[in-house]
Amino acid sequence: MYIGRAVDTIVHDHHAVQIAICFEDKIEMILTDLTINEKSIIIDSDVPHECRTRDNNFLLINIDPECKIGKGLRKVYLTGNKTARLPEKLVEQLLEDFIPMFLGEPNMDCIFKITFKFLQKLSQADVKEELDDRIVKVLQVLNKPGNSALKVKDLAETVYLSPSRLIHLFTTEVGIPIRKYILWARLLISLQHILNANDITEAALVGGFSDAPHFNRTFKRMFGLNPTLLFNNSQFIQAYV
């Protein structure tokens, strides 16, 4: 979750379902086949896009599509669609709660509770569809706080599958290749370390990247901008597991 001065991005795609809500004006979202101008928007995972934000303040939420809320959001808004506009009344209520805190001293706990309640309403989070137990275990291993980067071979051994079988099963269940998800998990590990220690070089190594430039290039390819630019323009960034 990011709150702060908006910055334009280059074309990028990431595994998260993304929600963008502008506090003042509309956001221009450019996809390969259309351009959308909305105050609030949701974009499906792995959809290439770029953003024109006109230097406004905005809220950006990236949500794991495998979690209950992520599944609910995709079912409600993104079945057959790459993107959708969010319900105006729910967005207005969120901004009424958000903006006073944004203008004052941000309270992380209050911000999280308000945002989580908003996401629950949006997602109608009562999704029953279950992943294969072996894939659930792999996701738990990859998203475990403090976990170091793992290889497909290591993950396959934890669930007693061959690497080739795990690659096929993961793509079928999750919807993207496992190596791309591992990269996503490594970025989140590094991001959490930056938030805790504010050291990009150390965070890059913790996430399994060779050095800070390697992390920066991967982050920019995934999110469309340099991580330093993102942190310099933010009033609030937080990652939740």
Image (cartoon, helix red, strand yellow):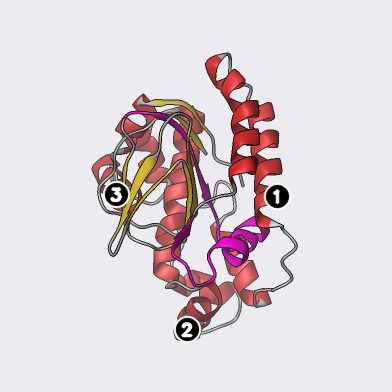
Q: Give x and y (percent) for residue 157.
A: 55, 76
Q: Residues within 10 Å of mark 2 (few under 14, many from 20)?
A: few
Q: Give x and y (percent) for residue 182.
A: 44, 62
> In this rendering, which labeled residue sits more in front, label 1 or label 3?
1
Q: Is residue 130 above or below residue 121?
A: below
| Residue at disc 3, secondary structure | loop
> In this rendering, which labeled residue sits more in front, label 2 or label 1?
1
* Residue, disc 2: 168
Name the residue type under label 2.
His
* Residue, disc 1: 120
Q: In this view, does 8 lie above or below 73?
A: above
Q: Residue at 28% of width from left, 52% of height from top? A: 221
Left or right placement of residue 10 versus residue 19 in this view: left
Q: Residue at 60% of width from left, 73% of height from top? A: 135
Q: What stretch is highlighted in magenta?
A: 55-84
Which label was assigned to residue 210? 3
In the foreground, 85 or 66? 85
